[in-house]
Image: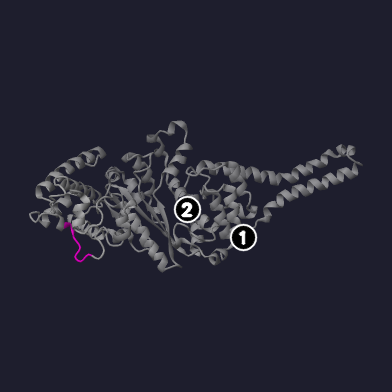
Amino acid sequence: MKVNQFLDHYGISENPFSQEDAQSDRIFQEYLLKNTRHAAWDKVLGSPATPSTAVVFGEQGSGKTAMRIQLVNEIREHNKATPKSRVFIVEYDDFNPFLDMFREKLSSWQKKPEKALQNWRLWDHMDAILSLIVTRLSTAIRNNGKDLKDDSHSISMEALQGLSRTQKRDILLLAAVYDNDRDLAAKVRFDQLRSKLRYASYGRYLSMLMGVAVTAGIFFVTYKMGGGWTGMSAYKWLWLIAVAAWFPFVWHQLRLFWQAWRISRQVRIVEHSVGTLRKLLATFNLSEYLGQPMPSKARSDDRYELILKLQNVLQSLGFSSISVIVDRVDEPHLINGAPERMRDLIWPLFDNKFLKHPGFAFKLLLPAAVSTFLNRQEREFYERSRLDKQNLIPSLNWSGQALYDIANDRIKACSKTGQGTKAGIRDLFDPAISDGELIGIFERLRAPRHQFKFLYRLLVDHCGKYTEDQPVWKIKPETLHSSLSLFMRDLDAYDRKLGTG
């Protein structure tokens, strides 16, 4: 018999257990997003109006990605309800672009995967987060305030034009360094952003105009005093004044080039052309540019100041806080699931000053394989990270009862519309199998993904034993136990390969 024939008997329109990844799971996203939540949900979410950090460790398939999707959805609902006190969402879950560029900027002997991430620092995380925020903000401004990915992040043009000149300058400074939108060339997108902000900086031409004016004046004087072209050579000493008049302009351009070169070296997660970056920095009035913090050194101090400037701008645009959701740490190809490399990438983030930065909420959804390193850390790590203050959830475990409810919810979500009493997970099994036995089996499976895989295999095994002409509508105990035995053997082997078994 076919699996869909078996499910159709119970009024189930599609296999509830065919999907294993929340990101591509239509059933979860359409029906269960608000109803199926882990017991630790409230601790992880906190209150969107009051930013709080949470650190979650969970094995593969335990629901970290589902929790990220739920966090984003919950914050979006909050943003719609409180448009003047929104939360800026940063999904920090695609590390590949940052790690690829980071690796390119390392010396050849450091580019080996096992060596590269040992050079990753806190300010690299700060640069990546700044890049995500600034790129999204700049793109929205260029689109007349519309955020094409999430309407709750859109900006009113009234609020945009209400920004002070200092705030507009800060947006442009941040965009010069961190705007990483590859749809347009750096100079083009910067000019468009400056046009939308209506930010003019004519004072940048003063030193150049002074050089042109002095040069033209000396040319005129020497031409007149020398009686023409041939007599100008008698007044060579006057041309020293022209050289001196150009000195402020040339000196400023050299300083900008030096600054651009240092930024391109220190911001290791974004590709910069030194010449282009110098041109962008040259668009600011000298008096407005000098003294501004720039990420030109291997330290976090300048980044903290830039974050404060960004927060000040976002506050004026209706965003009272920023929520950074970290997920999929094990997926980048430079890490490739290796716990040691995950540790090298994530450990710099465990800095209490950063995690408790005012107006920031970090939601770190981390693989369980990394948690084994916590017990091996020195006292200095715990003093710096203060994990006791970070809403730590050491294991994203699911009880058998919770998994039983998840299975019921998924079956009901897939039941055909117009049906009276909807089937549940219990209806699929022979009465000889008790509820307690089912719950005990689900307890052993530990995580939703393992449960879905097992139930999918169980349905296939059961249907494979019978024909369409002589179907059996209840899963027998012997089928349940034989499928479970094989599945647990495979699961244990997989755990041993990961080092978690």
Q: Is residue 71 above or below residue 270?
A: below
Residue closest to the far front: 469
The C terminus lies in quadrant: top left
Q: Residue at x 78, y 44 (%)?
A: 242
Give the vertical position of 419 relative to 117 (above or below).
Answer: below
- Which residue is tagged 2? 304
CA gap, disc 1 and disc 2: 27 Å
> Where is residue 388 drawn, in percent x and y?
30, 54
Image x and y of residue 119, in percent: 42, 39
Circle number at residue 162: none
The kind of residue tagged 2 is: Tyr
**11 with respect to 223 (left or right):** left
**Amino acid type, callout 1:** Arg
Q: Which residue is mark 1?
A: 198
**Badge 1, how many Cα within 10 Å: few under 14, some, many 20+?**
few
- Asked whether the viewer can see residue 49, the reply is no
Q: Is residue 420 inside the magenta stretch?
A: yes
- Furthest toward the top, the residue is 109
Q: Secondary structure at mark 1?
A: loop
Q: Identify the magenta region.
A: 419-425
- At x 19%, y 58%, the residue is 10
Looking at this view, is 294 or 3 the one in front? 3
Query: SS of the residue at dot 2?
Result: helix
Residue 37 magenta-highlighted: no
- 199, above or below 339, in the image: below
What is the basis of the colouring in this image? one colour
Which quadrant of the figure has residue 322? bottom left
Q: Position of residue 13 (x, y in %)?
A: 25, 57
Nearest the eye: 129 or 74: 74
